[in-house]
Image (cartoon, rainbow, N blue to C red):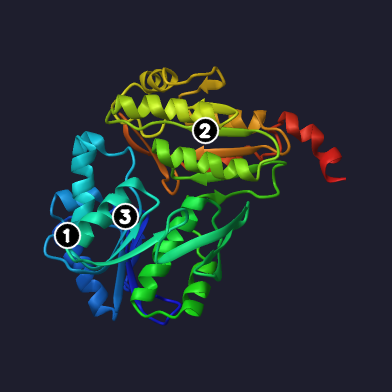
Amino acid sequence: MQQAGKKTGLIGTIENDTGKRRFPSGMTTPEATDLQQLFAEMVDAGCEYCVMEVSSHALAQDRVYGLTFEVGIFTNLTHDHLKFHRTFEQYYQAKYQLMRQSKHCVVQVDDLYGRRMVNELREEGASLTTAALDHQAHFQGSGVVMEQTGSSFFCNGEAYSIRMPGRFNVSNALGCIAAARLLNIPAPVIRAGIADVQVAGRMERVFSGQFPFEIFIDFAHTPDGLQKALETVRLFTEGRVIAVYGSGGDPDPEKRVEMGRIGTAFADIAVFTSDNPKDENPMQILYQMASGAETKNYQLIPDRAEAIAWAIANARPGDTVLLAGKGHETYQWTKEGREPFSEREQIASCLRPNRVFPWFFHKKKLYN
């Protein structure tokens, strides 16, 4: 929208931007009264559009009650938030509510629940547009090529590129292309608009060239998200994939078991560590994760800073280290509350001159 010259506000998980002020988010979708205040600021600032993430919690709690969205996009539904929603059916119905409040619906039909949603929306006579990589759709993606630096692909025969690797990022881009076209944004403008986007903590390549291996930070905190992130880095990793991740507080034991299984199945080494344990015992969470592991290729290191240092110390030239779960977050939520924690700072500390890692002695061989 900005590439098209439209002043646009933003509400989402990482930050809010009203055109007057830009600040970190407290939650993905604010409470109803806070949300209306943000909209009012955008109008005062001359914003023509607002792009926002609408969480399933917000839909279930009527935070967006009475709003009509010009375009609503459904991406997927996977194992998450079941402590709140209780069942996948209730989770699905919460997400479906967004479509009921949208003039135009864009649905990703590679997702099983997306295909169900399409059938139900057709029965209701909704304005419907589909997007997909692997299924027939109005906005059909193809020819995906992935590298460490990003992804290139075709949408309905036209070439696009984004700075984030991963088929899931291409899938998200297809939904954005569809939404923009519904808003009459020309394809060349869309192509330029998405080409330079880098979202903090979403398959973010960090400290490139300063280590003899790759390091990525990603927000993947669900079994599906973790698997897709690991499958992505596997495509361009010559050596081993080392995954550092945890499972948050507010227990969902089934999710933790699956997180343990996914990491050990799709990474060469999984390092189970803390990820916002809140009031829970971090080691108990790690034991639950370990119960899902079908192989013994994992380490239990509850201190996340130590887990990151261990992964970097044990990585070899050609490996990829994936730090999953925190993404854009700059805190660790423990029983003491939210404490400052930056994965980028932890990685940088491993570059200090007095830190010596095994791969250091290979540098001369690597770069000469």
Q: Mark 1 points at which residue?
A: 64
Q: In which quadrant of the rendered view does residue 337 lie?
A: top left
Side of 254 relative to 343 (left or right) = left
| Image mark for residue 56 | none
Quarter of the image containing the C terminus? Answer: top right
What residue sits 65% from the left and 33% below the top?
240
The amino acid type found where label 3 is placed reads: Ser
Where 151 sits versus 157, above or below? above
Q: How many marks?
A: 3
In the rendered structure, the answer to whether residue 126 lies left or right of residue 357 reads: left
Image depth: mark 3 or mark 2 in front: 2
| Label 3, label 1: how far apart the Cα atoms are | 17 Å
169 relative to 22, above or below = above
At 56% from the left edge and 62% from the top edge, which residue is drawn? Answer: 153
Q: Which amino acid does label 1 sit on?
A: Val
Tell me, for residue 244, which label it has, or none: 2
Structural crowding at the residue carrying mark 1, measured as other residues with C-alpha within 10 Å and reported as few (<14), some (14–19) or many (≥20): many
Q: Position of residue 73 (x, y in %)?
A: 31, 61
Q: How crowded is mark 3: few (under 14 residues within 10 Å), some or many (20 or more)?
A: some
Depth check, front residue: 101 or 42: 101
Q: Give the residue type at disc 2.
A: Val
Q: Which residue is denoted by mark 3 in the rendering?
A: 25
Mark 1 or mark 2, earlier in chain: 1
Residue 283 locus on image (x, y percent): 40, 19
Q: How far apart are marks 1 and 2 (CA)?
A: 36 Å
Question: Which secondary structure lies at badge 3?
Answer: loop
Secondary element at tag 2: strand
Please report the residue visible at 43 percent of the width from the left and 55 percent of the height from the top: 135
